[in-house]
Amino acid sequence: MANIQSAKKRSRQANSRNYLKSSQRASVRTMIRNVEEAIKESDVSKAKDLFVSTQKVLDKLANKKVLPKNAVARQKSRLIKSIKKLG
């Protein structure tokens, strides 16, 4: 356990940030899963609509450094590639 006041504060900040970022990552995973399910059902219009909202959230989280930018780019690329395969 930290003894210095600044170290205690940093520990509190890290815990609160981790809590927030964990919930954000979980929600984005759910959104990606919804897009993948729409692709699996071959519902192109639903997949495109879900992808647009998912893309916005992914970009926001990449800018806030919750997710790595390259990982976000890779996920978006794979999703749009599979949507385009449908037609």
Image (tube, helix red, strand yellow):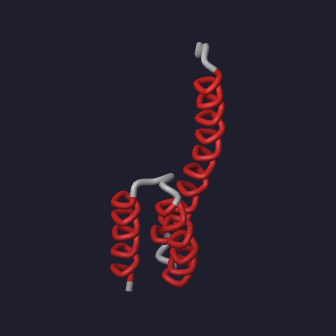
> In the image, is residue 71 above or below residue 45?
above
The residue located at (50%, 64%) in the rendering is 58
Q: Quadrant of the N terminus?
A: top right
Q: Nearer the viewer, residue 21 or 31?
A: 21
> In the image, is residue 66 above or below residue 53?
above
The residue located at (56%, 64%) in the rendering is 34
Q: Quadrant of the C terminus?
A: bottom left
Q: Nearer the viewer, residue 60 or 31?
A: 60
Q: Position of residue 16 (x, y in %)?
A: 66, 38
The residue located at (58%, 43%) in the rendering is 22
The residue located at (34%, 70%) in the rendering is 77
Q: Nearer the viewer, residue 22 or 45?
A: 22
> In the image, is residue 81 above or below residue 23?
below
Q: Position of residue 32 (x, y in %)?
A: 51, 61
Q: Position of residue 26 (x, y in %)?
A: 58, 49
> In the image, is residue 79 above or below residue 87?
above
Q: What is the tally of numbered marks visible in this picture?
A: 0
In screen coordinates, is 15 left or right of 59?
right
